[in-house]
Image (cartoon, rainbow, N blue to C red):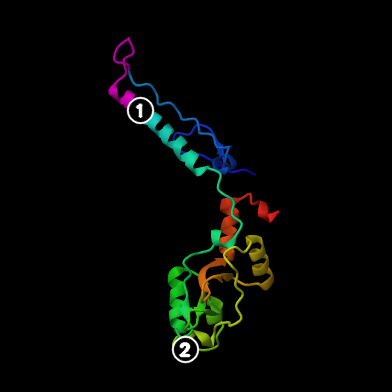
């Protein structure tokens, strides 16, 4: 089964492969506008025919320029810092659970690294950690993040291989992993890599030799 793209002014089908694959894209054939009524036997066109032809040329030129930009071969990605979400959103160990949940809801994310008073990562809290609590949220929201966060945190460095990251996320059945720069003191959380980031990399930067 193949998908075909059609649009105004396109006279032939454009397959989805041709629309998205570098080197395969070909501009659709535009339908020539019907000739206007001639002013005389010599064939002098009206102004509207000249304007229509000019618009056709401009549209075709813009299409080819855009196609060239969209279909440039993307640079391959291979390490965490190339795909991580940055800057990393974090909460402090004494922040409330309510603040953590509100931040995750506002930014549409599923986890937050938890920092200690010295700025080091100490724990991680996820949306699931909050929803699994058997306590009324009105009471839970006032409690410190440390009451529900996980204090055993898997982290990776900015140059960690993406394939290795994907393997660990899958084997440990975790949503994401903080990326920590160990060259700084104290080590600083510089980003977060989630399963969605890895899937996005596969979609946007395929083929990736690193997955072979």
Q: Position of residue 153 (x, y in %)?
A: 60, 78
* Residue positioned 51% across, 64% down in the render: 85
Q: Is residue 209 above or below residue 115?
A: above
Q: Nearer the viewer, residue 31 or 188?
A: 188
* Residue positioned 40% across, 26% down in the render: 33
Q: Give the magenta part as a residue range.
A: 38-54
- Left or right, 43 with reference to 151: left
Q: Nearer the viewer, residue 94 or 34?
A: 94
- Left or right, 126 with reference to 39: right
- Provide the secondary structure element on which disc 2 rests: loop
Q: Position of residue 193 (x, y in %)?
A: 56, 66
Q: Is residue 204 above or below residue 72?
A: below
Location of mark 2 (residue): 143
Q: Sequence-wise, which precedes: disc 2 or disc 1?
A: 1
* Residue positioned 44% across, 82% down in the render: 98
Dot 2 and dot 1 residues touching (CB under 8 Å)? no
Mark 2 or 1: in front is 2
Q: Is residue 29 visible?
A: yes
Q: Position of residue 131 (x, y in %)?
A: 53, 80
Location of mark 1 (residue): 54
Per the rendering, the mark at residue 171 is none
Q: Nearer the viewer, residue 161 or 141?
A: 161
Per the image, is 100 magenta? no
């Amino acid at each position: 089964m193949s998908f075909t793209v059609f649009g105004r002014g396109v006279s032939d089908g454009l397959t989805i492969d041709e629309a998205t694959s570098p080197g395969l894209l070909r501009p659709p054939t535009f339908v020539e506008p019907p000739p206007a009524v001639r002013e005389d036997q010599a064939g002098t066109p009206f102004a509207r025919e000249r304007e229509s032809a000019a618009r056709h040329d401009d549209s075709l030129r813009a299409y080819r320029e855009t196609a060239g930009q969209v279909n440039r071969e993307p640079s391959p990605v291979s390490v965490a810092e190339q795909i991580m979400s940055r800057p990393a959103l974090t909460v402090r160990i004494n922040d409330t659970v309510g603040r953590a949940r509100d931040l995750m809801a506002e930014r549409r994310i599923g986890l937050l690294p938890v920092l200690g008073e010295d700025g080091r990562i100490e724990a991680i809290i996820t949306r699931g950690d909050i929803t699994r609590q058997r306590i009324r949220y009105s009471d839970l929201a006032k409690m410190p993040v440390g009451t529900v966060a996980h204090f055993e945190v898997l982290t990776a460095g900015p140059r960690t291989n993406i394939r290795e990251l994907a393997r660990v996320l899958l084997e440990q059945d975790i949503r994401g992993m903080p990326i920590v720069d160990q060259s700084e003191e104290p080590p600083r959380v510089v980003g977060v890599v989630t399963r969605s980031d890895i899937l996005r990399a596969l979609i946007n930067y395929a083929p990736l030799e690193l997955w072979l």
